[in-house]
Every structure is written in structure tokens, then in C-alpha cells.
Amino acid sequence: MTPPNRTTLPMRARLALPVALCIAPLAADPALAEPETYRISGLAPGEALSIRAEPDPSAEQIGEIRSRALVFGCTNETPSRTTWCRVKAGRVLGWARRRYLAPD
């Protein structure tokens, strides 16, 4: 039984706020942005761009980009305050410096 003076919300309405609070941070996540193709720019010919596990130059190198990659979004909210992009090259998903990537 519902106590007096208490508004009873339908189940959908009670779930809407928690779901919205869980989804909101994902909308700003660079990993979830619509991917775009980028090419390497600003490196010497034949030089590969490192893909890092985290958006940090000292993070583990987990792969490299030789020509093109999918970019899912970029952020400058990094320890170094430089801009890094979430990239996918082949099977490797990680982070690469934005300054070496140009829209294709």
C-alpha cells in the first residue's frame, strides 16, 4: 500500500532518470563518436604514428598507424593537456596524437 501524499510514478518514469544519468557520460566519450577516416600528416615519409594504450606519450605503445586510421573523437583532457584521438588501425584500438592526423 502506498503511504498518503506520496506520488507514485509509473515504472518507466522511475527508470528514466537513472538510465539518463548512465548514458549522459557516454555521449561525451570519444570512443563512442561516429568514426571518420584520417591519414598521417606531419611525420617523415615512411615513419609510423604510435598508438598508445592511454592518451599519454609515456603510455605503452600497442600499435602503429602507417597510413590511415579510423578516428572516433579527440580530447585534450589529458595529463599533458595535448590533444589525443581515439583511433582504430586494423585490430588495434588506442590513442594517437591529433597533431599527426588529418581528415582524409
Image (cartoon, rainbow, N blue to C red):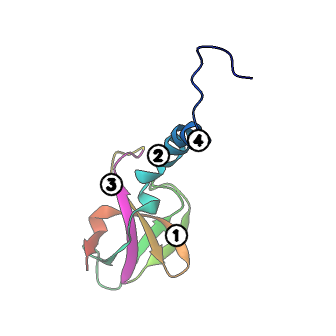
Q: Residue reaching furthest right?
A: 1
* Residue located beneath label 3 in the image: 83
Q: Is residue 50 above or below residue 74?
A: below
Q: For numbered disc 3, what is the local secondary structure?
A: loop
- Residue 25 pos. (x, y %): 47, 46
Instruction: Name the outermost residue toward the top.
Output: 4
32 in relation to 7, above or below: below
Residue highlighted by disc 4: 15
What residue would you read off at disc 2?
A: 25
Q: Badge 4: how crowded within 10 Å, few (<14), some, or many (20+)?
A: few
Name the disc covering residue 93, or none.
1
Q: Which mark sits nearer the N-terminus, 1 or 4?
A: 4
Check whether the beta carbons of the residues at disc 3 and disc 1 lie within 8 A of each other: no
The one nearer the camera, 43 or 71, is 71
Q: Residues within 10 Å of mark 2 (few under 14, many from 20)?
A: few
Quarter holding the C terminus? bottom left
Q: Quadrant of the N terminus?
A: top right
